[in-house]
Image (cartoon, helix red, strand yellow):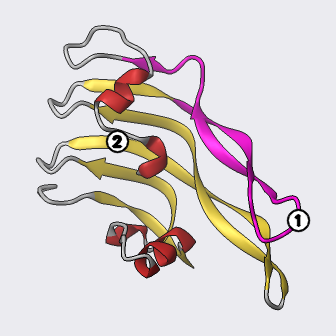
Amino acid sequence: MSNEHLAARGRHTVIENVDYLVSEIEKNPLPRWREFLRTGSWLYFYDSGREQARVTYKIGSYTECCTAGYCDQPYEYLVGEFEAWWPNGRLLVRGRLTPSSVHKDTNCDGGATVFHGIPSADTKYWTADGSPGDSSLLQQAGIFLDEL
């Protein structure tokens, strides 16, 4: 099977992604594969069909204040081992994403605590020619983990 023109491949839940719904309302649509929350291993591809990134999603939830009272709001976040490649196929990064808690504003007083995956200190980065590098290379390659 050719990966040409395939943007991403992985499992999703039946839970609609709030970010996707908001983007549709704001007329700034996200890719179709973002319609539902992603879970487990996902593989992303460059337009050429080469692999761009491999990541793993986990589902969490926080409390939102809804019209009828408190309600759970599920969300996805990155965890575990991850890899990304340069467009030329060379390895860009290999490491582990560790859950870190962050504050999220909600309709409830005080907001909520949610998790966000951040690269661990032992994550390794390489330039397009294979030389050792640092985390700034992800941005140079146009790979933003929070936008996958």
Secondary structure type for disc 2:
strand
The residue tagged 1 is 109
Q: Which residues are magenta?
A: 96-125
- How far from the left and from the top, in percent, is residue 26? 43, 76
**In the figure, 127 relative to 15: above or below?**
above
Main SS, magenta residues? strand
Q: Nearer the viewer, residue 87 or 95?
A: 87
Q: Amino acid at mark 2?
A: Ala
Task: Assign the N terminus to one quadrant of the image.
Answer: bottom left
The residue tagged 2 is 53
Residue at image coords 54%, 53%: 57
Q: Amino acid at mark 1?
A: Asp
* Magenta-span inclusion, residue 100: yes
* Farthest residue, direction front: 26
Relative horizontal placement of residue 75, taking residue 20 as reference (left or right): right
Q: Nearer the viewer, residue 87 or 65?
A: 65
